[in-house]
Amino acid sequence: MMSKETFKRTPMPLKVIFFISVGALYIVVFSGMVYFLWNAILPKVSPLKEVSYFQAMGILALSKILFSSMKFGGRTHHHKSNNWKEKWHGMSNMDKEEMKARWKGYCEKNENKEKNL
């Protein structure tokens, strides 16, 4: 495995080639998994037909779009929620009550909008 120092000294074009290769390998492997699992399970338990490898690749892309964000490094959301916890614990009781009141007003406003639809 390459150390951080060695990776830092690697020229940028090689890093780009490395990450493109890893991304392509990810697509090939996970598309193959979708292809295999779809064709092994779904036609037998449902009226769905078997899919080709490229259709499995499309299903993988569609599921990525529908069920996750398009941001790379999916841990950013958890980091943000930890910041809110730290911020909340650093607030005074008065600030917490004000925040709760504002949040309650926001929720009630959205409930009224949903009822009017």
Image (cartoon, rainbow, N blue to C red):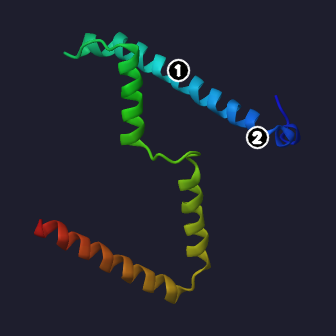
Nearer to the camera, 13 or 80: 13
Q: Which mark is residue 28?
A: 1
Identity of the residue drawn at 83% across and 37% down: 10
11 is higher (above) or lower (below) than 104? above
Q: Residue furthest front?
A: 13
Secondary structure at numbered mark 1: helix
The residue identified by callout 2 is: 12
Find residue 36 and report its image quarter. top left
For residue 84, side relative to residue 19 (left or right): left
- Distance, label 2 to label 1, CA atoms, is 24 Å
17 is higher (above) or lower (below) than 78? above
Give x and y (percent) for residue 68.
43, 43
Identity of the residue drawn at 57% across and 54% down: 76
For residue 87, side relative to residue 98 (left or right): right
Give x and y (percent) for residue 99.
44, 81
Disc 2 packing (10 Å; few <14; some 14–19; many ≥20): few
The tag earlier along the polypeptide, 2 or 1, is 2
Identity of the residue drawn at 41% across and 28% down: 60
Secondary structure at numbered mark 2: helix
Nearer to the camera, 59 or 97: 59
For residue 14, side relative to residue 76 (left or right): right
Three-letter amino acid code of the residue under disc 1: Val
Please give the count of numbered marks on the rendered protein: 2
Find residue 20 and report its image quarter. top right
Nearer to the camera, 53 or 78: 53
Identity of the residue drawn at 25% across and 71% down: 110
98 is higher (above) or lower (below) than 48? below
